[in-house]
Structures are given as C-alpha cells and as structure tokens.
Image (tube, rainbow, N blue to C red):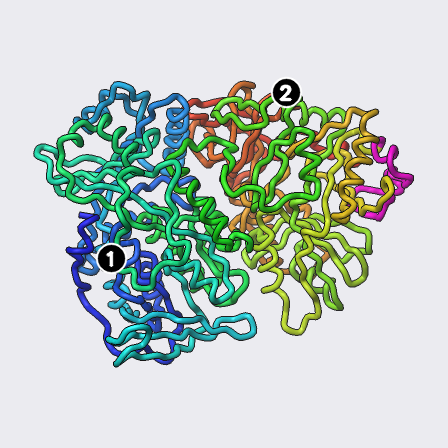
Amino acid sequence: MTGDRAAEREPAAERDGGAPPRQARAVIIGGGVSGCSVAYHLAQLGWTDVLLLERRQLTCGTTWHAAGLVGQLRGSRNMTRLAKYSVELYGRLEAETGVATGLRQNGSISLALTAARAEELRRSLALARAFDIEGGEIGAAEVKRLYPHLMTDDVVTAVHLPGDGQCDPANVAMALASGARRKGARILEGVRVTGVEQAGGRVTGVSWQRDGEGEGGVGEGGERGRIATDIVINCAGMWARALGAAAGVTIPLHACEHFYLVTEPIAGLGRLPVLRVPDECAYYKEDSGKLMFGAFEPKAKPWGMAGIPEDFCFDQLPEDFEHFEPILEQGVRRMPLLASAGIHTFFNGPESFTPDDRYYLGEAPALRGYWVAAGYNSVGIVSSGGAGYALAQWLDSGSPPFDLWEVDIRRAQPFQANRAYLKERVAESLGLLYADHFPYRQPATARGVRRSPLHQQLEARGAVFGETAGWERANWFAEPGQERAYRYSWQRQNWFNNARREHLAVRRGVGLFDLSSFGKIRVEGRDAAAFLERLCANRVAREPGRVVYTQMLNERGGIESDLTVSRLSETAFLLVVPAATLQRDLAWLRRGLGPEEAAVITDVTAGEAVLALMGPQARAVLAGCSPNDFSNEAHPFGTWREIEIGWGLARAHRVSYVGELGWELYVSAEQAAHVFEALEAAGQAHGLALCGLHALDSCRLEKGFRHFGHDVSDEDHVLEAGLGFAVSSEKDAFVGREAVLRKREAGLERRLVQFRLSDPEPLLYHNEPILRDGRTVGILTSGAYGHFLGAAVGMGWVPCKGESAEALLASTYEIDVAGRRVAAEASLKPFYDPGGARLRG
C-alpha cells in the first residue's frame, strides 16, 4: 500500500555493480518512474549503451509515495494518447519482466456537486468519446451502487470511465528498470551526478561521485569520476531544477507538500473504483481493504526553498493536520465510514509542480544534448510510461513522434527560474488540478512579472489583464464602474458584451490593441538572407520594406514556426512570433544556423512596443496624427516604412491578424506612451475603441486565421493546414520542400476546416468533438464567439483522404457541445471576407 513503501520497499530483482563506465551513449539522471521509463524505452529501441544513475535508491524521491492513480483522459488528444499507452504498458510489464505492477482497471468515478462542474464533466465525457475512451454519465443512484459507502444526496451528476484504475508506483518503476536491464541498459544506485560538462553549447559528459562511509562529502572508500557522453536526460524530479540550473538550463518547477491518509483495514469495504470529488478537492482509492484519502487543496504548501536535501531518501515531511483538516471534514461527510476507521498512516510527502501544471519534455533550448523529463504535477505515474516512450522516439529519430508542444521544455521562460516566483505560483497550481477548469481562467498568483511599456495607461482605462508567458496582456476593457475582474462560467462570462463591443468596433470603426508581447527576433549579418531563405517556406529575401507571412517547416512539412519576416535592410531582418513560442523559435533558428553561416540572432522583444490599429477607420486615425501618406499606392499591404507619429517615430507594418485594414506600429519602448496618446487623441473623432486579446481572437477566428499551438503544430503539414499560399513555388531549396512536393503529388489526407454553429446560443472554446454525417471525426482546435457573424465559430481537422474539397463540404456536420449535438456549417474559406478585400481596403 502506498504510504507503507518506506518500510516495505522490495529490493530490485537484479542490481548492477561496479564502477560507472568511462563513456555512454546516454546518461539518465534519476531513478524514479520517469528515469526508469526513459531507460526502458531507449533500450527497447536498441540503445544498449544507456546508463541510469540514481543518487540513492530507485524510487526513493517521489515515486515510492505516489498515489498510483491511472486516469487515461487528458486535456488533448496526444496527452491522452500517452496516458493510454502507459496503461497498456503497465498491463504487459508483469508478463515481460516478472515484476508485478499492481495494475487494476477498476474504473474511476468523478462527481459533480455543482452545475458548473457538471458542464465540465459533460464536456470531458464528449472528449473521451472522441478519443475512444469508454465512459458514460451516471446519476446519483448508479454512483451509490458502484460506491455504496458514499453520501450522494447532493450529487448533480457523475462520469464513469471503466478503463481507468490504479497501480503500484514503486513496482511499476522496478518493472521498467528490469525491462531496461534485460535489453542491455545499465542502472547504478548510490551514484550522484555532481555536474554536467559542456563545450561549444553541447553536453560533453557528466562528473559523478559515490560516497563512502565518511562524513561530509567523499569518505573512506568514496569514488569520483567522469563519463563522456553527448546526451544527458534529467529525470531528477524535484531535484531537476537545481540540477538544470547548475548547467545553465531553466527547468521551472518547485516541490509542494502533498497530503493523504491511509486507513486501517475496513471490514466490508469491497473493491471500489477510484473516486474523485474535485468540488471537495479530494480523491479516494481502495487497496487491499484499506482506503486512501488524499487532497489537492486550493492553497498548497511549497517546500524546499533552500533546495531539496541531498540525503532525502524514502523520507516524509512533518505532519500538518491543521492544514489537512478542512478537506478531511468534507471527506467524513462524503464518506461517513472515515469517521470510525482507524488511521494507519497520515502522510505528507513532496511532489514537484510547474507554473502551468504541465510537465517538461524535450531538449533544453540553451544546451544541445541536455534533455528533460520532469515536473509531473502529481500525475507522474500515468504520464511517465508515455513520456518515456515519446522522449525515446524523439532521441532516436531526431524529432518528436507527434505534437508535444504543450509539454515541450522550450515553453519555459528564462524568468521562471526565479525561486520566489515559483514558490508563489505552485502554491496555486497544485490546487488548480481539482479546481473548475473554466475557459479563459487566469492564474491569480505571481502576476505582473512582464509588463508592456503601456501597462499603466491601459490599466487606467479599464484593462483587465490575462497572462501569457509571464506577460500581462489586456484581454478586455471594463466599462466605467464595472468590476475589473473575471467571473468565470461555462456560459457567457461577465466580459462577453465588452468583447462584443470591441469586436464590432474593429469591424465597423477602428480598434487599438497593445501587442507588445509579440516575440521579436532580429537576424542580421552577411548570410542572414540566405539563412532565412533556407529555413522559411516563403520567399523572404525580398527588397527592404517588405513584410512576408511564412512558416518554418521541418523535414516532414510540419509547421515549426508561424511568423512574419520583415526585411529591414540588405543584411537585417525582423521576425515576429507569438509570445508563447519565442524560446522555441529562438532555439529553432540557432540550431538551424550552419557553422559557416555569418548571421547573428538576437531577441529584441523588450526594445519595442507594438500598437495595432485595426478597422475601416484606421487610415483616418493615422492621418490625424501623422503627415505620412497611408494610401494603398503609398503604403500597400505587406510592406513597412518608417513614419512620423505625434512627435515621435514608428515603423508601420501594413499587416492584420483580424482581417481588416490596419497597421502594426513598432515603437521604441521610450516613445510608446507618447505614440499611444497621439493615437488616442486622433481617434476620438472616429470612435476609437481600446481592444483586448479576446476580441482579437474572435476576429481572427471569423477570418479563419490559424494560431500556432492550437490550430497548427509541428505534426501538421503546411498544405493540409491550408497555408500553401505561404509556400513559395519559386524557391529551389528550403527545409521541408521535398515533403511539400510529395504531399502535392499524393494529395491531402486531412484539412483544417472552419465551422459556424447554426444556433446562436451555444459557446465554443476548443476540444469540442466534430461529427461528420453522425460520426466523430475530430475535435475543434480553437473556438470563440463570432460577434459579427452572430454565432460561435471554430476550427478543427477533418480527415479527407482521397476526397475532393466539394465532397468534404457536402457532408452534414455537427459539433458536440457538452453532449448536445449542434448543427454546423463547414467551410474551407473564411466565413468573414473570404476574398480579403477588407485587408486591402
């Protein structure tokens, strides 16, 4: 039983002895379930020269006391795919290795005690159906039948997933370790990595230490050494952050205290499914006649600000019953037998959490050969099997097996290495695991780290901010006297009409957005043009003054980056990318630069603010504060030029992400406030509205513009994404060209389709299933309310192998909104202004 593992830990079935080797193909640091999974999967691929180093004993960090819950449904198709793989893997490991994993697919039940939670569960159930996970909605009576000890009087509804279950975490890790050894991997316990060596931006080896019997470092009989390797995989769990920092790698995670209790055996308990009551922050697991009761409380207790003790091994943290008691009181009401059951173990152990409740996977952007699989946010058991598989495939082939952006280490921002920030944020992120997962929910802690030069001006005018990559961004503007805060709901939230006003101002008049959070990358030097021509699918080495929309592709034709490239001079270019992908894009560029190519890649994001003036009246507003000519003849679409504005200067880019006439104005940070005030004054005569990111998103969805990370990713072919117009047929060579030619020859297997609901009431967010002729064929990648179109709109992928566009559109489509099928119109052209006339107006 978890919670007893410190006393009952079974020895590994086999142990490796001797000193570490002098070299290895890959060195894995950390012997928890994550490290053992990576070792197992690399060995399965034939990597026999793999070495796993564990500073103490296998599973002694977090794995041994994990709850071992195995829930297959995750928030996206690929994360669900990995979780389902974990369940399948743990089910066959016992026969393969002889080590029991304790996997029991006894199902799970999630209760809803509120209408909002019921909506969330119904949406999750629709997603489960789309992902081929068996499940159904059940009422209180059926809950009582499956879980007779439960008080169900206030249950609104519940979801039952029969394929979920539980396992023994420590034995899962031991089974993985055994399987890795059988395929040739070597696992050494009691060997501590003291440093990761590097040269020329690459890993070159690790230094290690094996302590003897003495005190304070290497005692009598202690050893030190070095292992040459060009691949290190950090699977060190709650030690991962400090280990990464020592090598200059940012791994933003922090340990939190996690509480549960285990009862004495309870007569007549029976074999029960895993139970989650998120509205009471609690989960229940029956095992061997005992009951585990655990909590994800709203405000957690971070632990280890001074670092995780080096000698921490099968340890637990001091009890804090006062902290746990409010959750337990609710648990006793929900499960009355807890009141009389004896407590065998009251446990408090540390687990690592990340700022966004998603783990880290992949190669660190700052150091070649340094890989990470850590930060599992209390779902490490169900995640590690699939994560180990995916990382091994990535290492073996050089590219991920499918889109892993949501857990990619390249999403981590450098500032997130700050420990005070992490301590504040993870106190919230632990509780968010069981909080209502409302759309547009914003973090409440550790806010205000990155602010636009215009932050104070926007705040004074009613801006309500959200956060992306640490940036405070105006999401909507409150009316005078209106509460400046989100009131979350699955229905129309309190800002719905504010966003509608802003949206319609852009469509009918003019709106002003602060887009200073855009990532801005300057590429310059003798070979800058040739370098970018090779990496970009479109022709970007045009005359200075041009702005080109393009993608950077991988060899499969998948989209690695979605960006605009502006040529500033013969030797200098400005690349503009989404705020969330800046670190990813910088890494892709730097790794694509050849050793003989003379080009410098610089992040210049902080140097310029970006003000986007969009709408039919944009030209008139600019004319009121600038003497320059903004006519189509003087300043056509897809060009930039320097302009005078107010008493300052700006670089005006004629582009638009909302589908209207408009300019993005790039202004040096120190002049941003002045230019903002000049635009505001000039706009008074034209009804200028300050607009937020919610309006931007709804406008771009009406126009069918793609969003990287939602609609397109590195596994999505550029032609199937409908972006063939941004691939230059004039170019003889660029990364991904052969894949583009093959796809043109073979034909498309799927398409990104735009949808508009026939009913104006339902709302779309993302992940709603798409039904074609009554059969589920995909899910929406993004969704929002189209205020000009008068209904919710979204985009999603639809299979179409061997079909014409006409055949695809001839079908009948519906969108599943929380179990209700809503008729939808499908289109391969934008519903709004399909010819693009308004962009060029």
Q: Are marks 1 and 2 in contact (CB under 8 Å)?
A: no
Looking at the rendered structure, which numbered label has been put on residue 717? none
Q: Earlier in the sequence, mark 1 or mark 2?
A: 1
Q: Tell me where residue 429 appears, x and y as whole percent.
A: 43, 42
Q: Is residue 786 left or right of residue 663?
A: left
- Is residue 312 highlighted in magenta? no
Q: Is residue 363 left or right of residue 595?
A: left
Quadrant position of residue 67: top left
Where does the magenta region start and end?
620-644
Q: Residue at the far left: name it.
A: 267
**Amino acid marked by disc 2:** Gly
Under circle 2, the secondary element is: loop
Q: Is residue 516 visible?
A: yes
- Is residue 641 highlighted in magenta? yes
Q: Is residue 581 left or right of residue 821?
A: right
Looking at the rendered structure, which numbered label has been put on residue 481? 2
Q: Which of the two residues, 728 or 306, is positioned nearer the viewer here?
A: 306
Q: Is residue 723 above or below residue 780?
A: below
Q: Tell me where residue 593 appears, x and y as whole percent.
A: 63, 66
Magenta stretch prevailing secondary structure: loop
Q: Which of the two residues, 423 or 835, is positioned nearer the viewer here?
A: 423
Going 59% across and 48% down the picture, which residue do you hit? 718
What is the spatial separation of the Cα atoms under label 1 and label 2, in whole angstroms? 55 Å
**Residue placed under numbered mark 1 in the picture:** 314
